[in-house]
Image (spheres, rainbow, N blue to C red):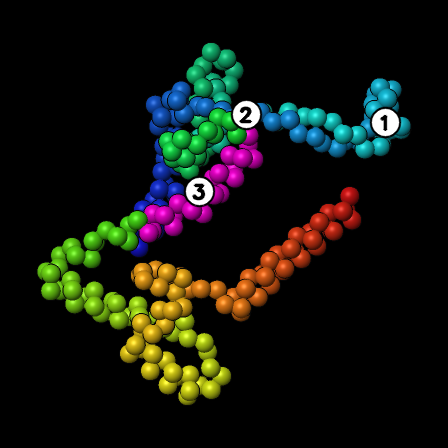
Amino acid sequence: MIGMIVWLILMSVVPWLLPEWPAFSRNPGLLLLGQAQKVDVVVTATSDDVAAGLAVKAGDPVHESETVSAPPLFFDSIARVNAVDVLSPLEGQGRFNVECYLMSLLGLPEKNFNAAQIYTCRWLFDGLFPTVMLVGLSYLPVGRLGRTQEEWLETRSRQQELDDRFFVKMKTKINSDWDEDKRELESRYSTPDSLNHLKLFPNSSWEFTKWTTDDSLGFAACWAVAFAILGLLWAVIRIGA
């Protein structure tokens, strides 16, 4: 819970508040750019293209190379404070990308990245960092605050019992016979360790379970549906083109 609160504050408030502080948004160390990128685009040939020998007739598709300007690393955009004064200082505008800044502190060479790679790094950070933070904060002894040693041990024991019941139910296959399913669960609640062989790491507190055939089939089915959707999207785009 604490991890989620910290994460929400970090990613929902801080990125929008910091750029409002001129000393921050105009800091030269934050006004860094990535790499420009050359991309191939398809355009409709004009009479000039025909004259230059780039196309047979006007209207034919022509491949051209365009340069995508270097993207800001830590802001949505960078502009002059006074748009009509070329001597006015530069400042970062829009959202401050905390993700990119933290990754740069970790040594990621973002100066060598183009716009697409920078956005990819942001998505990867958003996907991985909350998990890392959640695991790290889970080891903090927050539950001991305001409790004696006896109260803490009692609370921990109750929580362990609730956790065991949850994971026993999660690991037990559902039986179509409701009464039999209930009896099986009740019998396993008293011996939760009997299902440790299903763990990926049997001698640890990690509750990752080994994949079964059903898991593999379900995972494959999800990918098949995803590729089918992408294939349908590609077909629609091709029809429209």
Q: Circle 3 sits on which residue?
A: 125
**Tag on residue 160?**
none
Q: Secondary structure at mark 3?
A: helix
Instruction: Say whether residue 116 is magenta.
Output: yes
Q: Earlier in the sequence, mark 2 or mark 3?
A: 2
Percent of width and height locating residue 226: 61, 56
Residue count near mark 1 (Cα–Cα under 10 Å), binned few <14, some 14–19, many ≥20: some
Q: How many marks?
A: 3
Quarter that holds the C terminus: top right
Q: Residue furthest right?
A: 56
- Residue nearer the viewer, 184 or 47: 184
The residue shown at (16%, 67%) is 154
Q: Circle 2 sits on which residue?
A: 35
Q: Circle 1 sits on which residue?
A: 55
Which region of the structure is painted magenta? Answer: 114-135
Residue type, label 3: Phe
